[in-house]
Amino acid sequence: MRKRISFAIYFFIFVLSTTAQRIEPSFWWIDMHNTSLQLMVHHKDIGNLTPKIDEKSIELKAFHKAESANYLFLDLEIAATAKAGKIKIDFYEGKSKKLSLDYELKNREPNSAQRLGFGPQDVIYMLMPDRFANGNPNNDSPAEMLEKADRSNPNGRHGGDVAGIHQNLEYISKLGITALWINPLLENNQPKYSYHGYAITDFYRVDPRFGSNEDYKNLVKAAQQQGIKVMMDMVFNHCGDHHWWMRDLPFQDWVHQFSEFTRSNYRSEALMDPHASAQDQKLMNDGWFDHSMPDLNQKNPFLARYLIQNSIWWIEYAGLQGVRMDTYPYSDQTFMAQWVDAVMSEYPNFNIVGEAWLQTVPHTAYFQSSTFPQAKAPSHLQSVTDFPLNYALNAAFNQKEGWTEGMANLYMVLAQDFVYQNADSNVIFLDNHDITRFATQVEMNIEKYKMGITFLLTTRGIPQLYYGDEIMLPGNKSEGDASLRPDMPGGWLTDKSNVFNNQNLDQRQSDVLDYTRKILHLRKQHLALQSGKLLHYIPQDGVYVYFRFDAGERFMIIFNNNDQPKDIDITRFEEGLNGAKSIKSMEDNEFQSIMYHFMLPQKSAQIFQLK
């Protein structure tokens, strides 16, 4: 079930993991909404000892032995009278004290429970830290890490890090971004292919090739000072096969075990399929994501508690304002509902987006709060990834117009929004790290690309850009994942072109960058484009029109998907115009009297403000 490693390395890791002293979480806070805490203590033969705490405000309610003698789980209750500081946990064999450990309780940051999560008011910028910018070359290849940096290897480590992100926050802010989703930063001490971050080997440690925990905390603080929220990419479905606990599992059902390697069928639809076989459902949830990614069993109550506390620990420690949960459907759904509720109880204004990579609207909506409650465990998950709209985007600008083709793809998906509990909370996107980039989908056609950007930033939902979208970076999934995850131009000192200071970009890149920045700032300035109501009209003759409006302002967005200019007659859109007398395009400085007929160039979009 795991790859072979040399006996010498295996022996070293095994001895280290079974003798090293470890408490997780390593510290906690007083005045939390949930006053219960479970500590996982890992130390050789600690399961044979009895813990005691001599502190009136901290009650040791129970302790639990694991199947491995090297673990002990401690249930604590933290009283309202508890003070910040260190407490002592003693471990006895009979009346003889064998071990004494210090555990620290900290004060929370003021108003930490009230932090505001991301929402439709934001635009998310997703980046892969290893491929974004190398701010500190000195941490590229720490001796303790199994994989060293090799920028010549497309599937290897390239050296991007937290420092590189920190140094380019001003660029991200000036672009018009208000939220930052960083692919996982936690330790991935795997022998190879570790740069993506989804094979975690320590849930409480930033990978030293990216920096330190403190570096990450400082990044979040600096981003917030620039008006940028930071979301953490979390992974609960699996870990890396070189995670320290894989050499000494607390319980054998900590991960899903099979007689031989068994892969997930990746069919999330089986979870809500009324005709699904139990075998298909089990394979979906319990099968391993890959050879190097053991599937975690959230039905184990100690692992479930561990994961819930881990996410709350990071939110509190780093000051996060959002979470993106990887492979949301692959984990046990009863547990996922409990996890969401635990986070939202602690942080009522927070937000989480669950990655739900499914093909259709009903299958996607299944994972959002209050949709089909009779068919699933109740959850308060507000945001899901809108893959159906992504598929529609890829088709809309490439197909000839028809009853269900061309722009009708967008209309048909949005017309199904009644299925969602709240479609405005969906995270919408052109690209991410797993799919062929939109630039390649439209064959590097800049007119089609601009239409895609315009739609993304003016329709309902929470828009998410993928690093490089702003300069139309290509990437083809058929050529491997590395094609989708290139180094950001200018992130390395030897780069000839630099997007961060707009040097040596080609004409197309500069054009798309300027266009994207302009729409981002327009959206940032107008609430109607963020959270206003959406009114759209059935596409006709390759023309698609919709309005975004609230009580104070109104916008009309028009797309011409034809290969020739189109005479636009807007008298049809009387309801959306709502008696408007003046109009201003994105390029105009002033309003002018409304014109009911005008020519719109081929393969183009236009944003008009009305009053």
Image (cartoon, helix red, strand yellow):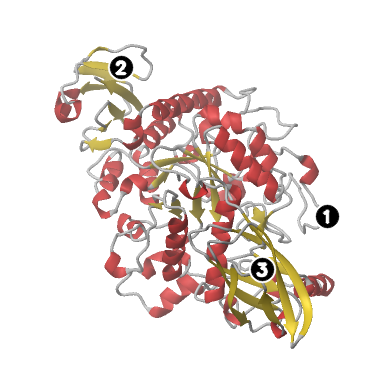
**Residue 563 horizontal/vertical position (percent):** 33, 28
Whether residue 66 is visible to the viewer of this picture, yes or no, is yes
In the rendered image, the quadrant that contains the C terminus is top left
Residue at the limit of the structure toward the bottom, as seen here: 94
List the residue tagged with mark 3: 241
Between residue 421 and residue 541, name the one nearer to us.
Answer: 421
In the rendered image, the quadrant that contains the N terminus is bottom right
Q: Is residue 476 above or below residue 88?
A: above
Q: Amino acid at mark 1?
A: Ala
Q: Is residue 68 above or below residue 170?
A: below
Between residue 252 and residue 550, name the one nearer to us.
Answer: 550
**Residue 162 horizontal/vertical position (percent):** 67, 43
List the residue tagged with mark 1: 143
Query: Residue at point 27% right, 38% down?
Result: 401
Q: Amino acid at mark 2?
A: Lys
Query: Residue at point 54% right, 30% down?
Result: 173
Q: Amino acid at mark 3?
A: Asp
Q: Is residue 31 above or below residue 575?
A: below
**Residue 140 horizontal/vertical position (percent):** 77, 46
